[in-house]
Structure formats: structure tokens, C-alpha cells
Image: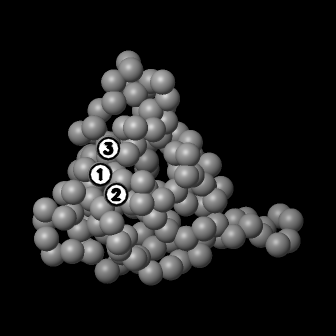
Amino acid sequence: MKLLTLSLAFLALAVPAAVQGQSTKIKEVPVQATQTLNGADLFNTYCASCHGKDGKGAGPAADALKKHPTDLTQLARKNSGKFDALKIQNMITGSDVIAAHGSRDMPTWGTVLGSMSSDEGTRKIRISSLVDYIAKMQAK
């Protein structure tokens, strides 16, 4: 439940501070399951607040994070032109902890997505759909 609460913060939009000099705050909201297993819907619900709807890392919550979110459109370019679907899947699920993430600002979505259904197959479809959607974002 603690991980779920931590993840809630990343689902909300960042609220710009009304007074200059105050930092951006992230509003916590309950995790809601998407009605579809469509990759775009999953991305917009769980990733866009930090990575932006275009995946370039400039979502409304990005400024509130210690580490700027990755530009997801450049993953293949940074990997010799190859999109590493397994690596991205492992980042989403939390199977691979990358030292650059430090405290792991990005929530472990495998746990969150899995908590929405007791069906392992549905969890796998959600993650696969999300990875496929990110693969389609790669800049040509």
C-alpha cells in the first residue's frame, strides 16, 4: 500500500506555485484503472504527467522531480538505433534498477498495474501495450 501511495503522486498534474519562488507541488490522487488496455490510454494515465503526452520528458509534474524525466522518444537513438523492449519493460516493472535513477523517482508501475487486477495475463497485456506504445514514439 505504501508503494501505491508513493505512486499516486506521479499520477497527478503538477500545480504551478502561485507565489514566485515556491517550488512546484505534486497533488496526490488515487490510482484509477484505465477502462482499456490500449497503450496510449495507459501512457496518458500513468506516464504523461511526468514524461509529457509527447513522451519528451516535459510533463506537468516534471519540474517537481529531482531528476528530469527521460525523453522517451530518444530511447532507440541512444541505443544505436534499436528499441530495447525488454529493457523498457524491466524499467516499468522495476525489474532493473538503474543507478542513474538513484531513489527511483519513477514509480514501479508493474506493482501498480498488477494491483488493478488479480489476473496476471491482464497485467502482462497492460505492460506490453505500454511498451509497444513507447516503441511507436521513437523519433525516426
* Tag 1 secondary structure: helix
Label of residue 132 in the image? 3
The residue at the point 44 percent across, 25 percent down is 78
Which amino acid is tagged 2?
A: Asn
Q: Which structural element holds mark 3?
A: helix
The residue beneath circle 1 is 129
Judge the density around disc 2: few (<14), some (14-19), many (≥20) Cα neighbours within 10 Å: some
Q: Is residue 136 visible?
A: yes
Give the number of the disc on residue 38.
2
Mark 2 falls on what kind of element?
A: loop
Q: Position of residue 133 (x, y in %)?
A: 37, 45
Q: Is residue 105 visible?
A: no
Tell me what residue is drawn at x 42 percent, y 54 percent.
40
Residue beneath the point at 13% across and 65% down: 120
Q: Give the amino acid at mark 3.
A: Asp
Give the camera-side residue of 94 and 103.
Answer: 94
Near mark 3 (Cα within 10 A), the count class, few <14, some 14-19 or many ≥20, is: some
Residue 107, picture quadrant: bottom left
Callout 1–callout 3 Cβ contact below 8 Å: yes
In the image, residue 91 above or below residue 126: above
Residue in the image at 23% along x and 39% along y: 86
